[in-house]
Image (cartoon, rainbow, N blue to C red):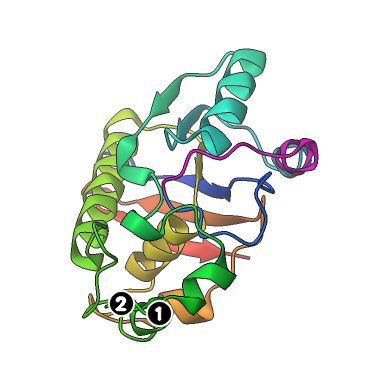
């Protein structure tokens, strides 16, 4: 096949109406400022040919409006919803730090691969669902010779994808500790597809 280069923009949702909470898979809405943050960020990006969004409202509402305005195809993917914190979802950080449940939130942040939130998702499950989706996206782009792709998702998902691109060890906690993704912040992944159809992603600054 003929080699080509394209881009994937990984965009985090904007500011939430609920403040200082562990949002997880709670379906919170954006503030007006949060919506405007996304509009401002997207206006800086190059030509986008397709959009993929998390199903959570803080991502999906903006994605649907953008897709309609620009007449672009939109895919809603459950695999890129935020990490499921189970019983901790939607709670304030202050309340969580005061709890004495086992495991505690402190245990989880220190050793996420050894701790699972009550009734939540294991880090291994999260890793696998995001990795499988990422591989599928790369395969689709390779097959379709697609242009720039916008992915509207969450900080946890973006950090996990960065870990894949950086080829960090599976159980590494580095991605969760050293990457900071602000509201409406984005990361550009330049993707080179070689003559064998092999994708070569790299982070572009």
Q: Quadrant of residue 167?
A: bottom left
Left or right: 80 in relation to 51 = left
Residue 45 % position (x, y): 68, 42
- Rate crowding at label 2 as few (under 14), some (14 to 19) or many (20 or more) other CA atoms within 10 Å: some
Q: Quadrant of residue 85?
A: bottom left
Residue at position x 44%, y 75% from top? 176
Name above or below for residue 188 compared with residue 74.
below
Residue at position x 56%, y 40% from top? 28
Extent of the magenta region: 25-38
Residue 99 % position (x, y): 43, 75
- Rate crowding at label 1 as few (under 14), some (14 to 19) or many (20 or more) other CA atoms within 10 Å: few
Can the viewer see residue 55 in this picture?
A: yes
Q: Residue 53 or 93: which is nearer the viewer?
A: 93
Residue 134: which disc? none
- How many numbered badges does the structure rendering display? 2
Q: Residue 87 or 134: which is nearer the viewer?
A: 87
Left or right: 102 in relation to 156 = left
Asked if labels 1 and 2 touch by Cβ distance under 8 angstroms, the answer is yes
Label 1 sits on a secondary structure element that is: helix
Residue at position x 52%, y 30% from top? 60
Label 2 sits on a secondary structure element that is: loop
Residue at position x 43%, y 37% from top? 54
Q: Which residue is mark 2?
A: 112
Q: Which residue is mark 1?
A: 109
Residue 74 % position (x, y): 46, 22
Q: Quadrant of the N terminus?
A: top left
């Amino acid at each position: 096949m003929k080699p080509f280069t394209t881009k994937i923009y990984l965009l985090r949702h904007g500011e939430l109406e609920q403040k200082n909470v562990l949002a997880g898979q709670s379906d919170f809405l954006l503030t007006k400022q949060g919506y405007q943050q996304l509009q401002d960020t997207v206006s800086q990006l190059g030509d986008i040919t397709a959009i993929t969004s998390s199903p959570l409202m803080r991502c999906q509402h903006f994605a649907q409006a953008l897709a309609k305005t620009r007449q672009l195809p939109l895919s809603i993917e459950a695999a890129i919803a935020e990490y499921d914190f189970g019983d901790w979802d939607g709670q304030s950080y202050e309340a969580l730090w005061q709890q004495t449940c086992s495991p505690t939130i402190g245990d989880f942040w220190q050793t996420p691969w050894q701790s699972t939130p009550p009734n939540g998702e294991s880090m291994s499950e999260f890793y696998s669902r995001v990795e499988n989706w990422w591989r599928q996206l790369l395969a689709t782009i390779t097959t379709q010779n697609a242009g720039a792709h916008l992915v509207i998702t969450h900080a946890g998902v973006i950090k996990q994808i960065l870990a894949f691109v950086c080829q960090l060890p599976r159980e590494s906690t580095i991605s969760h500790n050293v990457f900071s993704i602000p509201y409406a912040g984005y990361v550009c992944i330049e993707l080179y597809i070689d003559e064998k159809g092999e994708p070569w992603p790299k982070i572009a600054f």
